[in-house]
Amino acid sequence: MRSLMVTLSEAIAHARSQDRSVLTEIESKQVLAAAGIPVAEARLAATADEAAKVAADVGYPVVLKIMSPDVTHKSDVGGVKVGLADEAAVRAAFDEIVAAVTARQPDARIEGVAVQHMARPGTEVIVGMSKDPQFGPVLMFGLGGIFVEVLKDVAFRIVPLQPRDAKQMIDEIKGRAVLDGVRGGEAADVSALADLLLKLSAFVEANPRVEELDLNPVFAYKDGVIAVDARIVIGETP
Ligand code: ADP
Ligand code: MG
């Protein structure tokens, strides 16, 4: 198994050798973890046996996701199974994922699955970075699900962010009250969210090859946050 600490340049070199500009979830999370960003660590398993072994290692319940250089939206092709409680469930999920992806995308190269511990539910938020032709890297923050898809309730700031920018960004979304907890739900750790935005800003500033970045979703708890999905897109050599 490759070391869990992977530098961005190593990940880029590997992706380039496969003619990819999108880092896999596993690569993206390794690079972000090395930058101090909290992620649900994901490990590659090429077979059902390996998946069972990794699952025992990371602790049940686990999530399995398709790992293919040809698949970026994993759930769209039946490539994500959550809430797997034991080895039998992991083995079945491995076969189901490979079958579903093969049926929907017969020419997809399948490397295996990413195995990760299933994070407990939290308030779902999304964080992204894209490059504006005039302003350069811009960070986006919003609540997950319908808030972003239907209501487009998101806030933007130009990189680099100051602590005040991170706080304002969080406070200015229309659904801000959701972060205080709704219907008895847990409040979200707003200072951990602000810290995440600042760390991403620093990461993006230090790594101009990063063209696009998505953490979708991030789960926010009363104490801390964790990105359960991550995607980094690499640009042309600057
Ligand atoms: P996609 O490529 O389709 O965006 P995701 O990795 O975001 O795939 O997984 C789909 C959904 O599964 C997420 O929105 C989240 O609700 C859930 N999920 C994924 N990973 C985890 C995890 N480690 N713990 C808990 N839930 C997860
Ligand atoms: Mg996702």
Image (cartoon, helix red, strand yellow):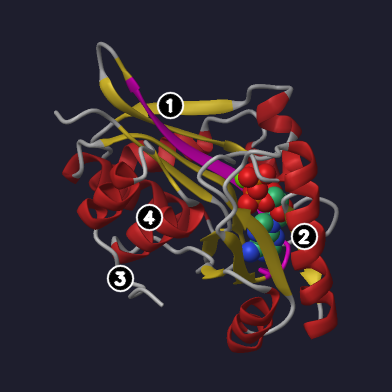
Name the chief secondary structure element in magenta: strand
Circle nearer the N terminus (4, 2) = 2
- Mark 4: secondary structure: helix
* Vertical relation: 208 (above or below) 184: above
Bounds of the magenta span? 118-131
Cα–Cα span, label 1 and label 4: 16 Å
Circle nearer the N terminus (1, 2) = 2
Circle nearer the N terminus (1, 3) = 3
Q: Which mark is residue 195?
A: 4
Q: Which mark is residue 5?
A: 3
* Vertical relation: 181 (above or below) 104: below
**Residue 133 % position (x, y):** 28, 12
Q: Quadrant of the C terminus?
A: top left
Crowding near pointer 4: few (<14 within 10 Å), some, many (20+)? some
Foreground tag (1 vs 2): 2
Q: Quadrant of ligand 2?
A: top right
**Residue 34 % position (x, y):** 30, 65
